[in-house]
Amino acid sequence: MHNVSPTRRGRADITSGTRWREGCARIAAAMAMVPMSGCTLELLDPKGSVGEQEKHLILIALGVMLLVVIPVIVLTLVFFWRYRETNTAATYSPKWAHSTKIEVVVWSIPVVIVVSLAVMIWETTHKLDPYRPIEPVATDKPPVRVEVVALNWKWLFIYPDYHVATVNKLVLPVDTPVEFKLTAESLMNAFFIPQLGSMVYAMSGMQTKLHLIASETGTYAGMSSAYSGAGFSDMHFKTHVTSRDDFDEWVRQAQGVPDTLDAPTYVKLEQPGTGAPVAIYANVMPGLFDAIVGKYMGPMDGASQDMRVTGNAIDDIIAAANCRVDGQLDSSDRRALLAQRPERDAGTQPGAQRALTE
C-alpha cells in the first residue's frame, strides 16, 4: 500500500474540490442560459381568455405537485443525513411500528389535495367546455364562424358567412368570439393553437366544436397535435389576429381572388401532400363542410338543422372524385359533372355515384 504525503494529499483534495466547483459552475451557467435561449413557452404566454384560464390551471396543478414533491425531497435528504450509520446520536428504534401523528399527516394531506382538485376540476370542466359559447366582448361583435377541415396534410379553413376559404392560414378579428366546427377528410387530427386555448380532435364523418377568443393582435402558431402519418410535421399554420377593420378588409380582398372552391377543386385539394402553400379561395361551394361530414354518414334522420347536409353538395364531391384521374380534372370532366346536376335534382342517382357505391 502506497503512502501519500500530507502535501500531496492536500493538493489532491484541492484539485478534486476545484473540479467539483467548476463542474457546478458550468451546470449553473448552462441552466442560466436556458431562459435566454430565445425559446418561448407558448402555453404560459396566452393571448386569449381561454388560454389564460388554462395557464392558471397549469400553475395550480404545478403548485399542488410541488407541495408533495418538495417536502418528500427535503425529508429524504434529512433522513439520509440524520440516520446515517456514523450518527450515533440518532434514535435507534428497531421495534417501532406505529405513530398516530404520522398517520394523520400521511392521510390528511392527500385527502385535502384530492378534494380540492376534485372541486376545481368539476368547476373548470364545465367552465372551459370547448362546446360552450363565449360571451361577446361587445354587442356589435357577433361571433365569427370558421369551419375547419383536416386534410392530409394541410388545414382548410372555410368562412361560411363570407364565402371564402384558406389553406394553412387562419385570420381572426381581435376581441371577437370564434365558433369553430371541425372535421377531417380521412385521418384523425387534433386542432391546436397553444396561445389561444383548448385542443380539439377532428375526425372523419364527425363534427366537433371549439370556441376561442383572442385578446391581442399578433401571429400565433397553429398545429396538429396528434400524429397522422408521414406529413404530420408539415401540418402547421399561422393564425393572424388583426383588428376588426383589418379583418373586414382582408375578407373583401379574399372575396375578390380569382380562385374558387367548388367540388372539383376540393377533390384535388384533398389529395395527400406535404408542404402545401398558403392559398385563398372565393365563392366557396355552399354546404361544402356539411357535405364533407355527410359523405361518410349518409342521411341522418332526426339530425339538427345545422347538421342537415345538402344532398347536391355530397353528390358533387362524389361525382368529382369519380371523374378524377391521378388527381387531375380537365374541362371535359367539369362539363360531365355539371351535366349530372339535372339528373340529381330529378332524384335519380347518376352513373358516377353508382360506380362509387357499388
Image (cartoon, rainbow, N blue to C red):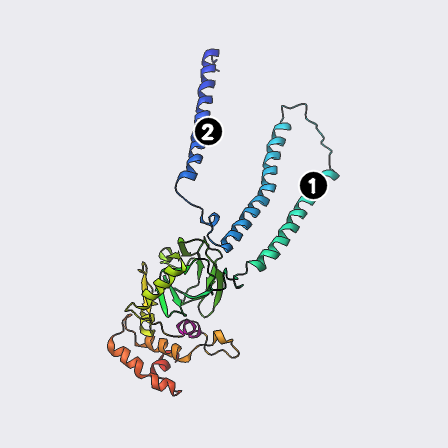
Which residue is pictured at 43% across the width and 57% down the height?
Answer: 174
Q: Is residue 288 magenta?
A: yes
Where residue 233 sits in the image (x, y, percent)? 37, 55
- Please state which amino acid type lies under the numbered disc 2: Cys
In this rendering, position of residue 324 left or right of residue 121: left
Magenta part of the chain:
287-296
Marks 1 and 2, Cα distance to the nearest angstrom?
36 Å
Q: Magenta region, mostly helix, strand or loop? A: helix
**Residue 23 horizontal/vertical position (percent):** 44, 28
Label 1 Cα neighbours within 10 Å, binned few <14 / some 14-19 / many ≥20: few
Residue 346 in picture, x, y percent from top left: 38, 88
* Label disc, if present, on residue 24 of the rendered structure: 2
**Which badge, 1 or 2, is on the more N-terminal residue?**
2
Q: Which mark is residue 321?
A: none
Pointer 1 and pointer 2: residues touching (CB < 8 Å)?
no
Q: Relative to 310, does residue 282 appear above or below in the rendering?
A: above
The residue depicted at 43 percent of the width and 32 percent of the height is 29
- Point 58% across, 41% down: residue: 66
Circle 1: residue type: Val
Residue 271 visible in rendering? no
Q: Nearer the viewer, residue 246 or 56?
A: 246
